[in-house]
Structures are given as C-alpha cells and as structure tokens.
Image (cartoon, rainbow, N blue to C red):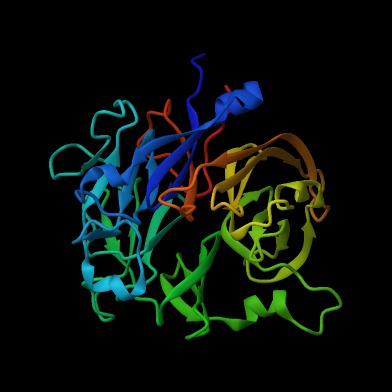
C-alpha cells in the first residue's frame, strides 16, 4: 500500500505553512514546518486572508482581499485600500517553490469548485455533513458596504452538478468567533454588537439563541463549563472542541438535537499543550480529525520576541460506553519556534489537514478532517 501524504496546513495572512503529519507520527523530532506558499511573493496577484477548503487531494482558497498599495496586514484605518473578489484559487502542492503554486480557477478548466456568487471578506469555512459553508465575518470591509450580498454560501461537492448556493444572511455582524458541530454553526458577535446566532443547515435558517450558550455560562451552576470554540470533531456521539479560553480540550455529551448539554469532561491529559512558558499572547487553538478517534490539536501564540510558538499533539480517544468519560491515549507532542515575519508573529486563521494521496473529489473537510493518516 502506498504511503499517505498527510499534511497539517496552517493558514496565516503572510504565508501558508505545513507540517508532514506522516513524518511526525513516524519519526517525531525530525518533522518540521515548511513554507508551502509565501503570499508576499505574489505581487498583489492573489488576495490575502482567504479561507481554505479541501476537495480530494487539492486545496482551494476563497474570499479575502487584495491590496491596492501592496500591504500584507489588514488594519481598520486602511480598509479603503482593499478591494474584494469572488475568485477561487487552487493550491498545487506538486509545483516547486520557484513556480506559481496558487492559480485562479477558470471556467472550463475542470476544477471541482467554481467562482463564488459574491465576495467574502475575512471569511470562515466550516464543513458540516460533507458540505462547505463560507461566511463573511466582516461583510463591510474594504470596498464592500454592509448591505452587500450574498455574505453566506454553501457548496455541495456530491451533487451531480456541484455549485455554490446563496444562503440567508446572518442577522448581525461582525463575527468574532464561531463553533461548528453536527449540522449547526454558532456565531459569536463582537462586544460592540453582542449576540449569538445559530444556523441550522437542515432548515437553512438563522435564529438568535442565548439558551444554548447560557448552558456554559450559567452563573448559578456549581462549576462553570468551558465554552466550545472553532470546528468540533465528533466521535461516537461525543463532541470534542478547544475551549473558547484556549486553555483546554473538552469533550461534550450533547443530546440528540445537539442543543442540550448532558455532561462535559475537560481532558486534563492534554493540558501540557496549553501550558506556559511561554505566556502566549493572542493564543489560538485548533482541533483536527485524523479519523478513527485519532485527532491533532494545535496551540499557537507569540513569545516575548514575537516569534510564533506552535505546539502540536497527536492523540487517540476511546469511548467504550455511552455517557462515560473518553479515555485519552497520547502519541506525540512537539513544540516549534518559527521566526517572526516582518517583526510580527502571524496570527493563525485556520488549520486543516490534507491527504495529497487522496484522489477523491468528494471526500473533503478543511476544518475537521475526515481522512485517516494511517496506512
């Protein structure tokens, strides 16, 4: 059987990084992050801040902004210097670094994805039940007005004629964070416009919902429950997610509707991933599914010299009885220190896994995986 090419990709505004997970699991200390693509070398030909999704063995990127003056950092006062695009780009990992690895998708070229129906500014991508959902978190950034539509679309790669479909607009913006599980997407708004909205992919409707989030923040509970954050991984009916405080990995037992919390367990066995030193500024945590109960958690942040510190742990969980606490089996933990970029540590926007040996056009999940890294 051919050896799998499983890579953990890390998307930031200045660059796309990747780590060979197959090498990490086999040789441990010899695996290192490498630059898969440096956006600063694209001469403003491609947007920055794009969201990534995986179809088969290919990585596609959507949304983002292009700079009119060559800048690589998005700051609020400079929004007028950016313009938005509906283009979709494909990353070709088979090309050398001297070649253009990131090229726009054009009609008739046989790509799995076509152009979006509308621009997506600072987008997030979540994969729920095999479909890709792309949401603009700040639809009024750059050349866009707040009333620009559509800001939310879905792509179903399993349809006879796959295409993007416009979905209802979220009632309020901007989106600060999110939690994705089952067939639901929870968005958390910025403090200037506080609120929580849940999109049900089966009904294709948004609804404001404080009841769900209050299960985690109820001050009358004897002990607080960590609020889930980011894309979840589900295994044998249990939902796994990084806490919103980015200090723990938590297993949640939800009811059949996915809305009522029955129990939760903080997986203290993995606490080393989130501990200092360094005291990480603007820490981010991401969980990725490797298949069959195996997962990968990535934690990142700055050190005092603005270097990017990344910790990656691969582990496996067992669940023998419904309602019991998952058993954690640690496999490998590695820490990486990556040099600062232009004096700053790049903030990680997303983490996803791609098996470049997978030739299917329908198995896809850029956020929580659905691939096994085992041969």
What residue is shown at x 71% (from left), y 52% (from top)? 274
Q: Nearer the viewer, residue 50 or 214?
A: 50
Q: Is residue 361 left or right of residue 106?
A: right
Q: Can residue 113 be seen here?
A: no
**Quarter of the figure that contains the C terminus:** top right
Q: How many marks?
A: 0
Q: Quadrant of residue 68?
A: bottom left
Location of residue 170 in the rendering, given as x and y in whole percent from the top left corner:
39, 77
Measuring from the top left, give residue 83's x and y in whole percent: 21, 65
User: What is the residue that sits farthest to the right in this orientation?
Assistant: 222
Task: Please say if 32 is above or below 370.
Answer: above
Left or right of residue 217, residue 150 in this image: left
Q: Is 23 located above or below residue 108 in the figure?
A: above
Could you tell me which residue is drawn at 30 percent across and 33 percent down?
Answer: 92
Give the x, y percent position of residue 34. Answer: 46, 33
| Left or right, residue 330 beside residue 167 | right
- Rendered residue at 57%/27% (across/down): 31
Residue 244 in view here: yes
| In the foreground, 32 or 239 | 32
Residue 212 on image: x %, y %: 63, 76
Image quadrant in which you'd find residue 255? bottom right
Residue positioned 36% across, 64% down in the render: 122
Q: Residue furthest left?
A: 108
Residue reaching furthest to the top = 1
The front one of 368 and 331 is 331
The answer to whether 72 is drawn above or below residue 224 in the figure is above
């Amino acid at each position: 059987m051919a050896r799998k090419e499983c890579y953990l990709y890390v998307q930031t505004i200045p660059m796309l990084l990747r780590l060979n997970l197959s090498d990490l699991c086999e040789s441990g200390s010899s695996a290192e992050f490498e630059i898969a693509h440096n956006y600063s070398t694209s001469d403003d030909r491609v947007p920055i801040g794009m969201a990534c999704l995986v179809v088969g063995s290919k990585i596609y990127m959507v949304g983002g902004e292009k700079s009119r003056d060559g800048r690589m950092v998005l700051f609020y006062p400079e929004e007028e210097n950016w313009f938005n695009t509906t283009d979709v780009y494909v990353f070709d990992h088979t090309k050398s670094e001297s070649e253009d690895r990131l090229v726009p998708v054009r009609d008739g070229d046989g790509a799995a994805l076509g152009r979006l129906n509308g621009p997506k500014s600072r987008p997030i991508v979540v994969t729920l039940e095999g479909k890709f959902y792309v949401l603009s978190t700040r639809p009024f950034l750059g050349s866009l007005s707040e009333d620009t539509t559509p800001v939310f679309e879905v792509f179903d790669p399993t349809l006879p004629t796959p295409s993007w479909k416009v979905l209802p607009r979220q009632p309020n913006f901007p989106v600060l964070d999110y939690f994705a599980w089952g067939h639901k997407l929870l968005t958390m708004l910025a403090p200037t416009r506080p609120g929580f909205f849940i999109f049900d992919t089966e009904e294709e409707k948004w609804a404001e919902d404080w009841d769900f989030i209050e299960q985690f923040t109820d001050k009358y509970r004897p002990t607080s429950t960590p609020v889930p954050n980011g894309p979840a991984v589900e295994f044998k009916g249990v939902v796994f997610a990084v806490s919103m405080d980015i200090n723990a990995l938590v297993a949640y037992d939800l009811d059949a509707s996915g809305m009522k919390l029955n129990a939760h367990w903080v997986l203290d066995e993995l606490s080393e991933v989130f501990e200092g030193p360094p005291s990480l500024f603007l820490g981010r945590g991401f969980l990725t599914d490797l298949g069959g109960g195996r997962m990968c958690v990535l934690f990142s942040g700055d050190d005092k010299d603005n270097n990017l510190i990344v910790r990656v742990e691969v582990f496996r969980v067992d669940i023998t009885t419904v309602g019991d606490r998952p058993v954690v089996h640690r496999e490998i933990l590695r820490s990486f220190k990556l040099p600062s970029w232009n004096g700053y540590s790049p903030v990680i926007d997303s983490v996803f896994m791609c098996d470049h040996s997978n030739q299917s056009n329908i198995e896809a999940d850029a956020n929580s995986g659905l691939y096994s890294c085992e041969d």
